[in-house]
C-alpha cells in the first residue's frame, strides 16, 4: 500500500500549499483597507444575521462612494458565526490571526459575542457590537463598543410598558443565555419595584424543537401578561405551541421583530413590544436606500445598528489612524458628531451606548406597526 | 498564511493527543468507548477554572487528569458484564449526562454560557509569537504522550490489553483480572484525553458544554479509523488529515465561492463519507497495525 | 395535570418513538448491530415528504407515502453499498459504519435543505378538548397512524410468507437457510421495512413539531432506551418499551409533590436513568431479547 501513503502525503501537501499560492490576493492588496464582520448567517438567528450583513454592505457601498478612507476602498470580510459561540470564536480567531483586521463588527447573540469579544480584547482588536445587550458587554474592555443599548435599558422599559398597560401579574420567558438572563434581571427588578408580581420565570434552553413542558410551567401561575424575548426560530415554536395549548395571556416582547420575524402571523397576532427606534430622518434615509438596494424593507432594527457600526468605524479611520489602537481612541469622538440611523448615539465610559430611544409596537395583520394606546 | 499553518498544527497536535488516548482504549484494548468528549470536557474545565482561580497551570492540568481518571473508573464499572455495544451506549449516555449536568448547574461552571477569556499561560512572555510557543509546547506534550503510550504498548501490560481485545475469555482463563486491566486502560486513556482538553481550553480561550458535544467524539473516532486504529503513527496521520478538513473549510471559502450555509454542512459531510469509506474499504486505516493478528475488522488478507 | 392529558401526551410521544424503535430493533435482530443510522433515515423520510408536499405541491398523504417508500428503497441501497461488505466483520465495525452513515445523511439533508427550521405548511392547529385533554387534530392523527402501522406490521409478520420468512431468519438463520429461505433477500426486505418505519416516525415528528436536520439525532438516546427497555430484537418489545419510556418521561415531568418538581431542563437525563435502571435490573428488557 505504498502508493496510498504517497497519495495521501501528496494530498496533504497540496491542500496546505494551496492557500499560500493565492496568499497575496487577500487582504490589503491594491490599497484596500480590510475590516471583519461576524454575523449569524446560518442557525437560529439567520434572519437577523442577514439583516445585519446587509446593513454593513449598504454602509460600505456608501462609504466607498463617498471617497472611502482617504481615497482607499473599505472592504469587509464576512464570517458566519452559525449562531454558535464555538463558530463565532473560531471566526474571530481567523479574522484576527490570519486576516489581521484592526476592527470587527459583530456578532448578535450575547452568548456568541462575549467569547469572541474576549479574544478580540486580549489581542487588541476593536469590536463594535450592533446586536448583543447583555450587561456583561460593559465588562469586556476598552476595545469593545456597542451601538445597541444594553439590557438595563430594554429590560426596564419593557417592564414599564407592561405596567402602563395595566398588568400587575406577569410571567417571564427568556432564552437561557447571557442575553436572556440580563433581560430577566432588569425586567424582574423594574416590575417588582413598581408593585408587580412575577408568577414564574422560565429560561428556555436554546435550539429545541419542543417547548411544551416549559410552556406548561410558564402558564401554571395564571399570569396576565408574558414578558418575553426569544430568538426567531425558537420564538416561532414557542408561540405556536402556546397557542395550540390554548393558553391565554398578553404577550409583551422585547425586540419585537426578532420575536415575530419568522413566526406564523396567527400565533403572534396582538403581541405588543419594544424595539430600538429608527424613524428619525437618518433612519428613514437608510430605509429608503435599503429598499432600493435589496428590494425589500429591513427586517428589523439590527440592520440599522450594524449600519451605524460600520459608518462609525469608517469615520474613526478617517479621523484618526487605521490601526486598532487609533480606531479605539477615535470612536467615542466621532460618535458625538455622527447622525445615527438609530438616534442619538453616544458611548459611555465603558464604550456602551448611553441612551436608546425605543418604539412601542404592536403586531397586527401580519406585520409590526407603531402602537399608541 | 504562516499564522494559519501554525494554528492548524496546534489543533492537529491537540486532537492527535486525544486520538492517541482513544487508540489506547479502542485500538489496543478493544473497548468501545464513545464518551471521549467527556474526558476532554473534564480536563478543559478543571484546568481553566483552576488557572483562573490562581492555581499554577501545571497543577490545574494534573487536577483535570485526576478528576477524569475518577470518571473513567466510573464508566468502566459496567463494562464488566455488559455487551460491547450496550456499553458503548452507556458511555455516550454517561458523557451526555455529565455534559447536561455542567450545562444546567450554573453555579458550577457558568452553565451554557461557558467560560470565556481563559488566560493563556505565559502569554506575557511571548507576546506576538505566542502561537509559535504554544505549538512547541503542544508538540512536546504530544511527543511525551506518544512515547509513553508506545512504551506501555510494548510492555507486558500492553500485551495483556491486546489479549483482552482478541480473546477476553482466554485472558480470564489465564487468570488475568479482566476488569482491572480494562479499568486501567480507561483511566490511562481518560487522563491523556483530559490533557488534550486542557490544551484546547487554554488555546481557544473559550469553552462551553456545547464544545464537547458527541460530534467531537465521532471526530476523534474518524481520525483513529482513517489513520489506522492500533497504530499510533497511523492515528497521528489520521488526526492530520481530519483536522485539515475541519479547519480549512473556513479559510477555503475565501478562495472558492461557497455559500455560507454550505460550508458548515460540507465539513460534516466529508467526514461522514470518509468514515464510511474507510470502514468499508479499508477498516485497518491508512497505516494498519504492524502485527500479524486477526484484527477485529476484516481478516488480514495479505496487503 | 389532567389524567387524560397525561395519557394523551404519553401516547403521542410513544407513537413517535415506537416507530423508530421498531426500525432499530429490526436491524439489531436481523443484522446484529446497533444502527445509529435509523434516526437519520427518519430525518431523511421527513425531508423527502417535505420535498414532495411543499416543494412539488403534492397532497401531503401522497407525499408521505412516496417518501416512506423511497426511504425504504434507499435503505436497501445502503445495504448493497455498505453493509453487504461488512457481513463478516464484527458488529462493532457495522456500528461504526452506521455512525458515519448517520453523519453523512444528516449533512446531506443540511446541504440540500439548509439548516433553517421547516414545516409541512399545515399552519396553526385549533386545539380540541376531548375528555378534559387539549389536543390538536394532528396529534390524534399521529397516534392513529402509528397504531395502524404497528397493527399492520403485526399482521404482516404473522399472515404473510415474507413475514414468516423474516421471523424464521430471525429465530435461526442457519435453519432458515437450510429450509430454502433466501436470507440475503430477507435482509434486504428488512432494510426496506426498517427504513420505511423510520421514515413514518420522522414524518410524524415533523407533523407534530417541525423539521430540522438534527431532528432524528436529538432522540437517539431515547430510541436506544426504548429498544433496550423492551428487549433488543423484539418488535413488540419496542412498542411496550416506548410506552413505558414515554410514561416515565411525562409522569416524571408532571410530578408535583409538595412543590418539588423534576427540573424540566433535566428531561434528557430521564433517558439515561431509565437506561441504567433497565441494565441493572433486567438487561434483557421487559419482553426479553432474542439470543441469536
Image (cartoon, rainbow, N blue to C red):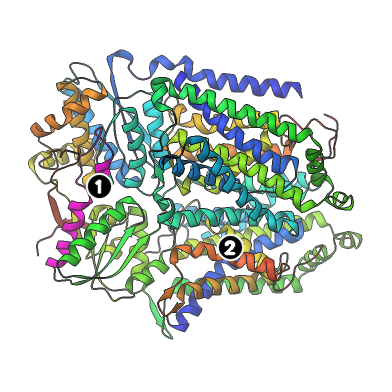
Q: Where is residue A200 in the image (x, y as percent from the top left)?
A: 31, 69
For residue C9, side relative to residue A358 (left or right): right
Q: Name the residue under label 1.
A: A299
Q: What element carries label 1?
A: loop
- Number of residues whose C-alpha sits closer than 10 Å to that of mark 1, classed few (under 14), some (14–19) or many (20 or more): some
Above or below residue A70? Residue B163 is: below
Chain designation of label 1: A
Q: Can residue A15 be seen in this view?
A: yes
Q: Split into 4 quadrants, where in the image is the C terminus of chain A?
A: bottom left
Chief secondary structure of the magenta portion: helix
Q: Can residue A362 be seen in this view?
A: no
**Mark 1 and mark 2: span between their CA atoms?**
42 Å
Residue C105: x, y in percent? 57, 47
Which segment is the magenta one?
A137-164
Dot 2 lies on which element? Answer: helix
State the residue at coordinates (53%, 17%).
A17
Based on the displayed image, in which of its 4 quarters is residue A214 positioned? bottom left
Instruction: Using the image, tell me which numbered label, if any, was put on residue C272.
Output: 2
- Which residue appears farthest toward the bottom when viewing the image? C131
For the N terminus of chain A, the image quarter is top right
Which chain does the residue under circle 2 lie in? C
- Whether labels 1 and 2 share one chain: no
Left or right: B139 in relation to C95? left
Q: Residue B52 versus residue C183: which sits nearer the camera?
A: B52
Mark 1 or mark 2: which is in front? 2
Check if residue A160 falls in the magenta segment. Answer: yes
Amino acid at each position: 500500500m505504498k502508493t496510498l501513503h504517497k497519495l495521501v502525503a501528496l494530498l496533504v501537501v497540496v491542500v496546505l500549499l494551496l492557500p499560500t499560492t493565492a496568499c497575496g490576493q487577500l487582504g490589503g492588496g491594491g490599497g484596500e483597507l480590510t475590516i471583519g464582520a461576524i454575523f449569524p448567517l446560518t442557525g437560529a438567528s439567520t434572519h437577523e444575521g442577514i439583516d445585519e450583513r446587509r446593513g454593513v454592505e449598504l454602509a460600505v457601498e456608501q462609504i466607498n462612494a463617498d471617497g472611502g478612507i482617504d481615497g482607499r476602498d473599505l472592504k469587509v470580510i464576512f464570517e458566519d458565526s452559525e449562531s454558535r459561540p464555538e463558530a463565532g470564536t473560531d471566526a474571530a480567531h481567523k479574522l484576527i490571526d490570519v486576516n489581521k483586521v484592526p476592527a470587527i463588527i459583530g456578532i448578535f447573540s450575547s452568548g456568541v459575542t462575549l467569547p469572541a469579544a474576549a479574544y478580540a480584547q486580549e489581542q487588541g482588536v476593536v469590536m463594535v457590537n450592533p446586536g448583543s445587550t447583555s450587561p456583561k458587554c460593559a465588562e469586556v474592555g476598552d476595545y469593545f463598543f456597542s451601538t445597541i443599548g444594553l439590557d438595563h435599558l430594554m429590560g426596564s422599559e419593557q417592564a414599564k410598558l407592561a405596567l402602563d398597560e395595566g398588568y400587575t401579574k406577569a410571567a417571564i420567558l427568556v432564552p437561557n443565555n447571557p442575553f436572556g438572563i440580563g433581560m430577566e434581571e432588569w425586567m424582574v427588578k423594574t416590575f417588582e419595584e413598581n408593585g408587580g408580581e412575577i408568577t414564574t420565570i422560565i429560561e428556555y434552553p436554546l435550539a429545541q424543537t419542543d417547548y411544551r413542558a416549559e410552556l406548561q410551567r410558564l402558564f401554571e401561575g395564571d399570569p396576565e401578561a408574558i414578558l418575553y424575548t426569544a430568538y426567531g426560530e425558537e420564538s416561532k415554536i414557542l408561540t405556536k405551541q402556546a397557542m395550540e395549548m390554548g393558553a391565554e395571556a398578553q404577550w409583551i416582547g422585547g425586540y419585537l421583530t426578532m420575536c415575530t420575524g419568522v413566526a406564523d402571523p396567527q400565533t403572534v397576532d396582538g403581541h405588543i413590544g419594544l424595539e430600538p427606534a429608527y424613524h428619525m430622518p437618518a433612519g428613514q434615509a437608510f430605509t429608503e436606500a435599503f429598499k432600493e438596494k435589496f428590494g425589500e424593507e429591513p427586517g428589523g432594527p439590527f440592520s440599522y445598528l450594524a449600519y451605524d457600526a460600520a459608518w462609525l468605524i469608517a469615520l474613526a479611520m478617517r479621523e484618526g489612524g487605521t490601526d486598532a489602537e487609533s480606531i479605539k481612541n477615535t470612536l467615542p469622538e466621532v460618535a458625538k458628531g455622527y447622525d445615527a440611523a438609530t438616534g442619538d448615539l453616544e458611548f459611555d465610559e465603558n464604550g456602551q451606548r448611553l441612551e436608546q430611544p425605543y418604539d412601542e409596537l404592536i403586531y397586527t395583520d401580519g406585520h409590526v406597526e407603531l402602537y399608541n394606546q | 498564511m504562516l499564522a494559519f499553518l501554525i494554528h492548524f498544527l496546534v489543533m492537529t497536535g491537540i486532537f492527535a493527543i486525544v486520538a492517541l488516548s482513544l487508540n489506547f482504549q479502542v485500538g489496543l484494548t478493544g473497548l468501545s468507548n464513545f464518551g471521549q468528549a467527556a474526558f476532554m470536557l473534564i480536563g478543559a474545565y478543571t484546568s481553566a477554572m483552576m488557572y483562573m482561580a490562581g492555581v499554577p497551570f501545571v497543577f490545574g492540568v494534573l487536577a483535570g487528569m485526576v478528576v477524569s481518571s475518577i470518571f473513567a473508573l466510573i464508566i468502566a464499572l459496567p463494562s464488566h458484564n455488559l455487551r460491547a455495544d450496550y456499553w458503548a451506549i452507556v458511555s455516550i449516555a454517561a458523557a451526555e449526562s455529565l455534559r447536561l449536568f455542567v450545562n444546567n448547574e450554573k453555579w458550577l461552571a457558568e452553565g451554557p454560557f461557558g467560560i470565556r477569556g481563559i488566560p493563556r499561560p505565559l502569554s506575557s512572555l511571548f507576546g506576538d509569537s505566542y502561537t509559535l510557543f504554544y505549538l512547541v509546547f503542544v508538540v512536546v506534550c504530544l511527543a511525551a504522550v506518544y512515547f509513553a503510550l508506545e512504551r506501555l504498548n510494548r510492555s507486558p501490560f500492553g500485551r495483556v490489553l491486546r489479549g483482552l481485545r482478541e480473546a477476553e475469555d482466554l485472558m480470564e482463563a489465564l487468570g488475568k483480572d479482566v476488569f482491572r486491566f480494562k479499568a486501567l486502560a480507561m483511566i490511562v486513556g481518560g487522563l491523556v484525553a483530559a490533557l488534550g482538553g486542557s490544551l484546547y481550553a487554554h488555546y481557544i480561550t473559550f469553552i462551553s458544554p456545547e464544545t464537547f458535544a458527541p460530534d467531537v467524539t465521532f471526530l476523534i473516532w474518524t481520525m483513529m479509523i482513517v489513520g489506522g486504529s492500533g497504530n499510533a503513527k497511523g492515528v497521528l496521520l489520521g488526526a492530520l488529515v481530519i483536522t485539515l478538513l475541519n479547519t480549512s473549510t473556513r479559510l477555503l471559502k475565501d478562495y472558492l465561492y461557497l455559500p455560507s450555509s454550505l460550508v458548515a454542512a460540507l465539513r460534516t459531510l466529508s467526514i461522514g463519507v470518509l468514515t464510511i469509506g474507510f470502514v468499508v474499504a479499508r477498516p485497518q486505516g491508512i497505516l494498519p497495525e504492524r502485527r500479524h493478528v486477526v484484527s477485529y475488522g476484516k481478516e488480514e488478507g495479505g496487503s | 395535570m389532567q389524567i387524560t392529558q397525561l395519557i394523551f401526551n404519553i401516547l403521542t410521544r410513544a407513537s413517535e418513538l415506537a416507530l423508530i424503535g421498531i426500525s432499530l430493533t429490526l436491524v439489531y435482530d436481523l443484522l446484529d448491530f446497533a444502527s445509529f443510522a435509523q434516526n437519520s433515515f427518519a430525518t431523511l423520510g421527513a425531508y423527502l415528504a417535505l420535498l414532495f408536499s411543499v416543494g412539488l405541491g403534492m397532497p401531503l398523504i401522497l407525499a408521505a407515502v412516496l417518501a416512506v417508500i423511497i426511504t425504504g428503497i434507499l435503505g436497501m441501497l445502503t445495504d448493497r453499498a455498505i453493509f453487504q461488505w461488512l457481513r463478516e466483520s464484527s458488529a462493532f465495525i457495522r456500528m461504526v459504519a452506521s455512525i458515519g452513515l448517520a453523519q453523512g445523511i444528516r449533512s446531506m439533508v443540511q446541504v440540500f435543505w439548509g439548516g433553517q427550521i421547516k414545516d409541512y405548511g399545515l399552519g396553526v392547529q385549533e386545539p380540541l378538548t376531548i375528555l378534559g385533554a387539549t389536543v390538536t387534530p394532528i396529534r390524534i392523527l399521529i397516534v392513529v397512524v402509528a397504531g395502524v402501522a404497528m397493527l399492520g406490521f403485526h399482521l404482516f409478520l404473522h399472515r404473510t410468507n415474507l413475514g414468516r420468512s423474516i421471523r424464521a431468519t430471525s429465530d435461526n438463520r442457519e435453519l432458515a437457510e437450510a429450509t430454502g429461505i433466501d436470507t440475503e433477500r430477507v435482509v434486504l426486505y428488512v432494510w426496506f421495512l426498517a427504513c420505511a418505519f423510520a421514515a413514518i416516525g420522522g414524518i410524524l415528528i415533523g407533523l407534530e413539531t417541525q423539521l430540522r436536520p438534527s431532528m432524528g439525532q436529538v432522540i437517539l438516546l431515547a430510541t436506544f432506551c426504548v429498544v433496550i427497555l423492551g428487549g433488543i430484537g423484539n418488535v413488540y418489545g419496542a412498542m411496550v418499551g416506548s410506552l413505558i419510556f414515554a410514561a416515565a418521561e411525562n409522569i416524571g415531568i408532571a410530578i408535583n409533590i409538595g412543590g418539588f418538581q423534576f427540573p424540566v431542563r433535566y428531561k434528557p437525563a430521564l433517558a439515561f436513568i431509565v437506561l441504567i435502571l433497565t441494565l441493572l435490573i433486567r438487561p434483557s428488557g421487559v419482553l426479553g431479547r432474542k439470543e441469536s
